[in-house]
Image (tube, rainbow, N blue to C red):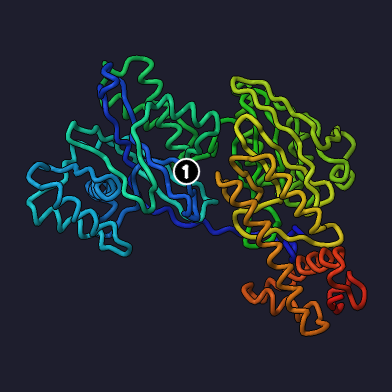
Amino acid sequence: MSEHPFGQRPVPVAAPARPAAIIALVRRGQAPRADGTFELFVVRRARELKMFGGFVALLGGGLDAADGDVRAPEALVRCAARELFEEAGVLAVTRPAQVSAALRDAARATLCQRGADAAGFQRFLETHGLAVDGARFRPAGRWVTPRFVPTRFDAHIFVVEATLEDEPRVWPGELSSGEWIDPAVLVAQWEKGDVLLHPPQSHLASTLASWNESGAHSFSWDELCRGIATGGHRDAEQVATRIDFQRGIITFPVITPTLPPAEHTNVYVVGTGEFIVIDPGSPYEDEQARLHVLLDELCAEGQKPRGVVLTHHHEDHTGGAVAAARHLGVPIFGHARTLDRLAGGPEVARQIIDDGAELDLAGPLPIKLRAVFTPGHARGHLAFHDERSGALICGDMVSTLSTIIIDPPEGDLGQYLGALERLKQLAPRTLYPAHGLPTQHAAEKLDEYLAHRRARAEALAAALYRGARDLADLVAEVYADVPPLVHPLAARSALASLEWLASQSRVRAVGPAQDSTSRWALI
C-alpha cells in the first residue's frame, strides 16, 4: 500500500520563495597562502536541524521586514550585513574600529537570541553612528530554491572580501562550525561525497577554484562576480534545475501517486559519463517530459545512458520506467520480483539483478553501485550502495518525511528489520531516500527506524495485557499520536508488527490474520 490510497494525483503547492541574501566571504593572500588566490569561508549547519542538518553552507538568511522593502536594493544589502554579523561576527560597516569587541559581542548575542527582533541590528548601528558599507557587498546573481523544497528562498549572492581586521567566528546554535577553505578542496570534498552542497555553493566553489587555477591575482571584481552570476543549471526564473548534493548523483523529484505527506518520488540520475536512472516513478506524461528534458541534456553533453534501474515494483517508483527506457533506448534493471510485476510491452528489454550485482559507471568520476537485497517493504526491494562515497540510494527503506508502511502480506516486518540491520553494517554515510531530502546522518536515521518499529511492536504487545483486542482498537490506542485519518494506513503496519510478534510466539490472531477486524491476544 505505497500508492496514494485514493488514486489521486497530488497537487503540490510550492511555498513562496522568501527573499534572502547569501554571503560569499572571501580572502586573498593570507598566510600560509600568499599567492593572491581566494579562500572561502564556509559553515556547517547543526546536525539537529530538520532541513539540511550537517550540510556545509555559506553565510546568509532571509530578508526581514526591518531590512526594508525587497524592491529597494539596499534592503538586501542590509540583510546580508545583518546575517554576516549575526552568524560570523563580521561587522561590514563604516568606521567599525570605533566599536569595541565587547560591544560587538553584546549586540551580536542579543541578535542571536531566539525570537530576537531583527531591527536590533539597525538600532545598534544608529546608536554607535555606524552605517552599512554597501561598497563591500558585490552582487553576484541569485538562485531560487526548487519548488519541491518545503522552505524556499530567492537568494541573492553577495561577494564580500574580508579585511585583515575581520575575524569570522561561528557561535554554536543553528551553525556548528566555520572555517576558511581552499575552494578546490571544497570541490574535491563535494566530489567524494565527504560534504553535501546545495547548487549555489557547489557552483560558487567551482567558479572560485577555476579562478584560482587560472590566476586569481589578476582580475576585476566585476568579472569575477559575472562568472559567479552566470553558469550553473538554472531556468529563466533562476530556479535550480540540477540538484546534485554530491557530484554524480542528481536528485530529480517527480509528482507521483504516493502516500501523504509525500507528493513526489525522487528520481536519482547517477553517473558522470555513463549514467543510470533510478526509480522514474511518475505515470504522468508532463512529469515524464520534465525528466526526459534533463536526460536529453545529459546525452547532449556527451554522457551515455546505461539503463533504468528500479528499487521495487510500487507504482510511485515504476510509473515512468518504461517511458524512460523507451526514450533512452536502454533496458530496465530490477529484482525478479520487481520485473515480473512491471507493466509495459516486450519492446523494452529487462535484465534481472540480485543481491551483490555491481553497476559500474565509467566517467570522469567513476561510480560503482552494488545492489543490496532489502525485502520487507516489498519482496523484491533493492538498495544501491556506492562504497567509494558512502552514498546509499535506499528506495523505500527509509524516508526523511515520515514513516514507511509495512503492508502484509507483501510487507514483512521481520524481513524489514533484518534489512535495516544489514544496511547499518554497510556503514553508509549519506542516505538518499525515495521520499524527502537526503541526510548525512545515515547511522542515526537507521537506528531511529529500528527503534521506532520495535517500540511500536512492544506498545502493541503491552496493550494486549488487558485482554484480546480488535486491531482497530489497538491502533486507536497505540497510534494515538497519528491523525485518525491515517489510522487505516497505520493499521497495516500494526498488522505487520503483530504478525512479527506472532512469529516469536508472543501473540496470536483470534481469527484470520489478514482480516483488519480480527482480534489479537497474548499467548
Position of 79 compared to 279: left or right? left
The picture quadrant where one finds residue 298 is top right
Q: Where residue 396 sits: x, y (%)? A: 71, 51
Position of 121 compared to 489: left or right? left
- Say above or below: 499 vs 473: above
The secondary structure type at the circle numbered 1 is loop
Q: Nearer the viewer, residue 136 or 92?
A: 92
Q: Which residue is mark 1?
A: 55
Position of 214 compared to 219: left or right? right
Which residue is located at x 37 percent, y 15 percent? 214
Which residue is located at x 48 percent, y 38 percent? 197
Position of 506 compared to 34: left or right? right
- Say above or below: 270 vs 413: above
Q: Where residue 464 sits: x, y (%)? A: 78, 79
Q: Where residue 312 sits: x, y (%)? A: 78, 46
Which amino acid does the dot numbered 1 rest on?
Answer: Phe
The answer, for residue 283, to whether it is visible in the render is no
- Say above or below: 373 vs 305: below
Q: Nearer the viewer, residue 46 or 454?
A: 454
Which residue is located at x 44 percent, y 30 percent? 186
Which residue is located at x 28 percent, y 43 percent? 169
Q: Where residue 108 sits: x, y (%)? A: 23, 53
Q: Residues within 10 Å of mark 1 (few under 14, many from 20)?
A: many
Q: Nearer the viewer, residue 314 or 8?
A: 314
Tag count? 1
The picture quadrant where one finds residue 430 is top right
